[in-house]
Image (cartoon, rainbow, N blue to C red):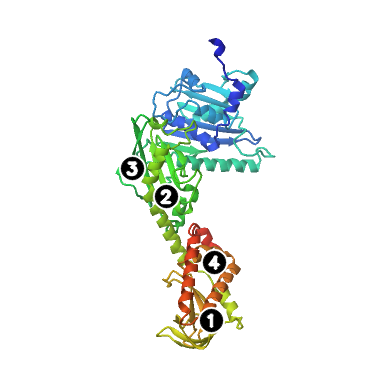
Amino acid sequence: MSDLINEPDASRLIFGLRDTGYNFRTAAADIVDNSIAANADEVHVRIDITTEGKKYVYFGDDGDGMNDAELHAAMRYGAPVRKNLASLGKFGLGLKTASSSVCRQFAIVSRKDPEAPLNKLAWDLDHVEETGRWEMRRDPIEPHEQEAFEELCGDKGTLVVWSKCDRMLSKHYDEPGGAKEQAAIKRLRKGLMEHLALIYHRFLDEKDTRERQITMSVNDESVEAWNPFYPEKSEQVLSEKQQEIPIEGDDGELLGTAGIRAWILPHRNTLTTEQRKKANITNRGQGFYIYRQGRLINQGGWLGVFGAHGTFEPHMSLLRIEFEFGYELDEALYVDVKKSQILFDPALEEYLAELLSNARREANNRYRRKEKEAAVKSVLNHSSANTSISATPTAKKPKIESVDESSQTAVVTNTHGAGIKIRQPIQNNVDHDKIHVDAVETITSGDLWVPVLRSENTSGHVPGVELNKHHDFYQKIYQRARANGYSVQGMDLLLWAFAVSEMDYSNEELAPIFEDIRDVVSSNLKKLLRDVPLPDGADLSEGGDG
């Protein structure tokens, strides 16, 4: 049977495993997983770059540590199954594939007992390529490794060292170790801190008792927990009974129970600047946050439950779903080798879609309600259109003979002749800058615009138009056009022209037809704009005066 053994080419496989989908942050988190699995209370990361551009990453913990035999087993591709199945490790590949995705050489220095000597083993991809063998290196412990162990681990624990870091940064710099590369390393540290703060927030938050507490640092700066659900201000909307989901296997046997909670975050318009930073409400922040053994493995997105993968809906930005499970559901949820992705089977997708339907509806309503409130309160300046109309006395319009404010009627001379009586809103004491065009909150008919007769005192009324601030066209189109004064002015002039034309061609017989036309146009515009999102804070803050 020996001729059937077909061992993989060492060089091709070890280099091929570099491309398993890690980035620097996810690779670093996989190393931290091992520290937590080793019962570490403290985990420290240090990212260094020399003036010559050599880059090193050190991961140190005060966990159980390893003797020589345990270290040898841990460095094997496909390490033995851990005794504690609930640990964050899973396939025995994470340490190796995560490390090699960033660097061409990685070493582990470890010991279980403060009195024992340090043990070290390393994988050097260049050495494997040269020899063609799955052969590790047992090099002497270098001074920088000894120093890092003492500083980051203490008396015992484990130190992982990445060197020959050819994939740490996304680009190569003309001046290795220069100011630009140093700045890139600084950004890398900041990004890693933010990533760790989210991924391990249950472990880092001393108020969260679901997981044991640990401390972390990056280059001596403490990592503070960031809870994506912002429970201080958010509302959890699933009942206690709905928060448990039994997961069954193909044979109907209960495999375990997943937990789920649906959080609706407060709208950004209700938060202070500091609170907005803490909530970090964005389109990409919506959706599922998946936890395996208390560690976040997937953040954001709807995972195919609502729309295709990668689908984000602006009006769902307030909804975040907390979904957690234990190791016993790994196979049922198809956990990948990086522990960064799961798949819901069709039956679970259907169940989740039904379970979360009310939460989605409520999140949508709250989002739209606040956005509409913001749009209504937002002030657009329509004075440009008013100035243009006042400066154009030759525009064709009816002549106002008299008005009766009590009956809201007027007698006009228009296309139908003199003495034409029309029913029309009459308004006195109107601000000069709003005499022809004004946006109001008082229109209850649902129409986008209403023709009016207006005066700066109680006589000399002129034709004008009121715009409905509650209509979708005003909230979604006008508000987005606010940065371009000509766009706002152009729409103002168009609707004023419609209003004036109606008064110029109207009489008691034709008035209902014009009202129907306004109703149909306004209704169709609302339908056409149904899927257009309301403007966000950035839209409303641009070009304030139109």
Q: Mark 3 is on which residue type?
A: Gln
Q: Name the residue furthest left.
A: 241
> In the rendered structure, which disc, 3 or 2, sits on the residue that comes first in sequence?
3
- Quick check: marks 4 and 2 in contact, CB under 8 Å? no
Residue drawn at x 50%, y 85% as measured from the top left: 461
Report, in whole angstroms, how far the alpha carbon at label 4 lies from the one at label 2: 30 Å
Please state which of the two labelled residues, at mark 3 or mark 4, is closer to the viewer: 3
Report, in whole angstroms, how far the alpha carbon at label 3 lies from the one at label 4: 45 Å
- SS assignment at label 4: loop
Residue 315 position within the rendered picture, expressed as x and y whole percent measured from the top left: 46, 54
Residue drawn at x 48%, y 61% as measured from the top left: 527
Report, in whole angstroms, how far the alpha carbon at label 2 lies from the one at label 1: 50 Å
Please state which of the two labelled residues, at mark 4 or mark 2, is closer to the viewer: 2
> In the rendered structure, which disc, 4 or 1, sits on the residue that comes first in sequence?
1
Q: Provide the residue designation for mark 4.
A: 544
Residue 225 can be seen, yes or no: no
Residue 392 can be seen, yes or no: yes
> In the rendered structure, which disc, 4 or 2, sits on the residue that comes first in sequence?
2
Q: Provide the residue designation for mark 1.
A: 504
Q: Nearer the viewer, residue 546 or 459?
A: 459
- Quick check: marks 2 and 1 in contact, CB under 8 Å? no
Report, in whole angstroms, how far the alpha carbon at label 1 lies from the one at label 3: 63 Å
